[in-house]
Amino acid sequence: MLDRPVITLTTDFGLKDSFVGVMKGVICSINPDANIIDISHSITPHNIIEASQVIAMSYKYFPQAAIHMAVVDPGVGGQRRPLLIAADDYYFIGPDNGLFTPIFEGPHYFMKVFHITASHYYLPLKSATFHGRDIFAPVAAWLSKGVDSSKFGEEIDDYVKLDIPKPMVSGGTIEGEVIYIDNFGNAMTNITHDKIIELGMDLSEGKLKVLCKDMEINLLNYYLQAKGAGLSALLNSSGLLELFIYTDSASASFGIKIGDKVSVTSI
Amino acid sequence: MLDRPVITLTTDFGLKDSFVGVMKGVICSINPDANIIDISHSITPHNIIEASQVIAMSYKYFPQAAIHMAVVDPGVGGQRRPLLIAADDYYFIGPDNGLFTPIFEGPHYFMKVFHITASHYYLPLKSATFHGRDIFAPVAAWLSKGVDSSKFGEEIDDYVKLDIPKPMVSGGTIEGEVIYIDNFGNAMTNITHDKIIELGMDLSEGKLKVLCKDMEINLLNYYLQAKGAGLSALLNSSGLLELFIYTDSASASFGIKIGDKVSVTSI
Amino acid sequence: MLDRPVITLTTDFGLKDSFVGVMKGVICSINPDANIIDISHSITPHNIIEASQVIAMSYKYFPQAAIHMAVVDPGVGGQRRPLLIAADDYYFIGPDNGLFTPIFEGPHYFMKVFHITASHYYLPLKSATFHGRDIFAPVAAWLSKGVDSSKFGEEIDDYVKLDIPKPMVSGGTIEGEVIYIDNFGNAMTNITHDKIIELGMDLSEGKLKVLCKDMEINLLNYYLQAKGAGLSALLNSSGLLELFIYTDSASASFGIKIGDKVSVTSI
């Protein structure tokens, strides 16, 4: 294992309560060398799809063997299983509620999914309502100390997958939708750079038409190019088609929200 | 001392200003090996009771010898003393304004309280308004490097205790109140699992009646059990009676706020 | 280099999205020993002056050789250059848009400014919209591993400076303005303790008159002294004249906002 193994956290716990701090306390009580990095604790409460997108956009930027722990878990205490996933270079730990759908969907050259049942790795006093503290944090910490992933439970293949909306292709048009609004009010869609290239579309200036809410939107390369130009589009740093306004909120100004349809067509 | 001694931070400084970062800079300038963990910086400004509850709910989940620094300090610069507390396995550093009342109240098998006066451990330029930076952070850092707690000042026993509301028992009823609303809108009360057990009450299904605002509320074991059931109650992961709605905000939906009365009675 | 080199982060990325976590992932992939400390991620979107003030108030509290990375960058992808500054005991990394004006203005005994062009230190896949991830984070990480600052590009001296408002002195009066509102609603001005001393003004009680919005405001030493006294002033922990109300928001109560004029005169 690394000298400073990385454990990332993604939750809907917010930053006011002590929940996040407590999980970090549990982790560093077991592994003082863990390097704990917050991805987000401001996922909309109970929004599993949003959390799955935040993880999908970020997990590859961490060092090999990083452990990505995610807790958005309205079913805590019920029948849903705690999971440990080993996929390519990374580990994922969290509830079996679809949170890791983008990981399951791959592509990956290697993946094993374990139902965590080895309760001797849990905190001694297990509550029914805070598995982040009592199960996921200690399992992440023990894994980061080098315990083999197969020690935490049986391998399974009937894990839960969410039906995450995919873009549709018909004729020369890709029809997708807005899947995420960021801090700047930029609206990310599920239309990817890879899909546009795969269809042989031409990304050079003036060759593609982007449509949303009956507006025709210019496709540019970076934000500054849209200075004074109103609603614009670009392929963003995650490889997703994104609608934006230069130094303003596309979401607020045009009422763009998650689920709104967006299309791309060759001119 | 540990290789990576833990210092936790709890403040009302918020996350926009540089105050928290500056305290971390001071700490790691003195002890580069300190493992600084945020508990919360979003305590309601000047709310000492809220901060004391956040600390009480979290401090035990950190490794032995962890230093819990808390700065909610409307009296900074005035007569209130800076304190260092050694209690059982933990240290606490902050102003003498009642913030550490739950620690003082115990139970603990060991406690010493020091009035911090050893100004050679302070930053050279002491301001009258930011003791978090100028006194508490450097003292925490030096303590984490192994300086004995008795070196920072004289032991005292006239520290400030707040009058934190306690539940009352009369006949077969415990009458308590809401003491904290969390990120999900769950309302935690001061009625504890331990108190219910101590009174010989029966926690099995249908044996206890929970009342709040003239509503009779079902006592369940975990959140999912309340799916579609409206306002419900459970004993939460901190051992406190909590009012909640499944995937919704009890506080927002029923106007439940801090100070609202809640009672538990055997049926 | 230090065993645990410090890299601080100041951005307008907010805490919901994965942007900040991703930059940390990039940094610790290159240098697992980096000690990454957040200064703020809640800078008002695109507000370069606000970010420059947050950095100016905090950078000196970090250990020698700390690397201060700041990304408030509406011109990302365009002509503006990425910069690395070595100034006295610290490094600064970010866009050439004026963010580091207070560093350029000094005083400093040593400063070199480099235009970052050594693209072999960038992430392999450079996007046009997220230089925080693709250029600044990896350059900060390599610098923290001991790569010499001159290796990242050519020295320049035509970097961008913003016109940050300075207080004016006429007769016995200093006329300044509000430059920052903090989490408590305290209003910091650009009138400094040093300027007041330089002009030979007398800071003892009752010798100075502070004026804002036609109100005459008492100058005190610490917050508690203003209990029950309404709008008051003090010289704060950054050495700036600050308007405040004891345990209340001066900004909200008196509508004080950035740009409001404030003056100090000897009585």
Image (cartoon, coloured by chain):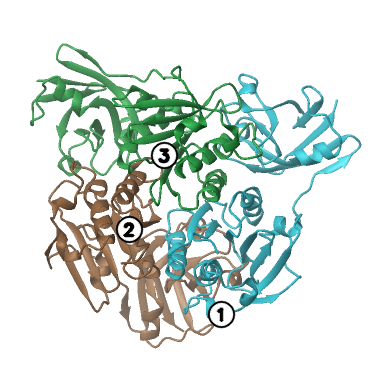
Chain colours: A cyan, B brown, C green
- Residue furthest bottom in the image: B200
Q: Position of residue B216 (x, y in %)?
A: 49, 72
Q: How many marks?
A: 3
For disc 3, the chain is: C
Q: Position of residue A45 (x, y in %)?
A: 56, 55
State the CA–CA distance, disc 1 to disc 2: 33 Å
Question: Comparing marks 2 and 3, which lies closer to the viewer?
Answer: 3
Question: Comparing marks 1 and 2, which lies closer to the viewer?
Answer: 1
Left-right relation of B52 to C234: right
State the CA–CA distance, disc 2 to disc 3: 32 Å
Query: Residue A23, relative to residue C167: is it above or below?
Result: below
Identify residue for label 2.
B51
- Depth check: give the residue in front, B130 or B79: B130
Quadrant in which residue A209 is drawn: top right
Q: Position of residue B132 (x, y in %)?
A: 26, 49
Question: Comparing marks 3 and 1, which lies closer to the viewer?
Answer: 3
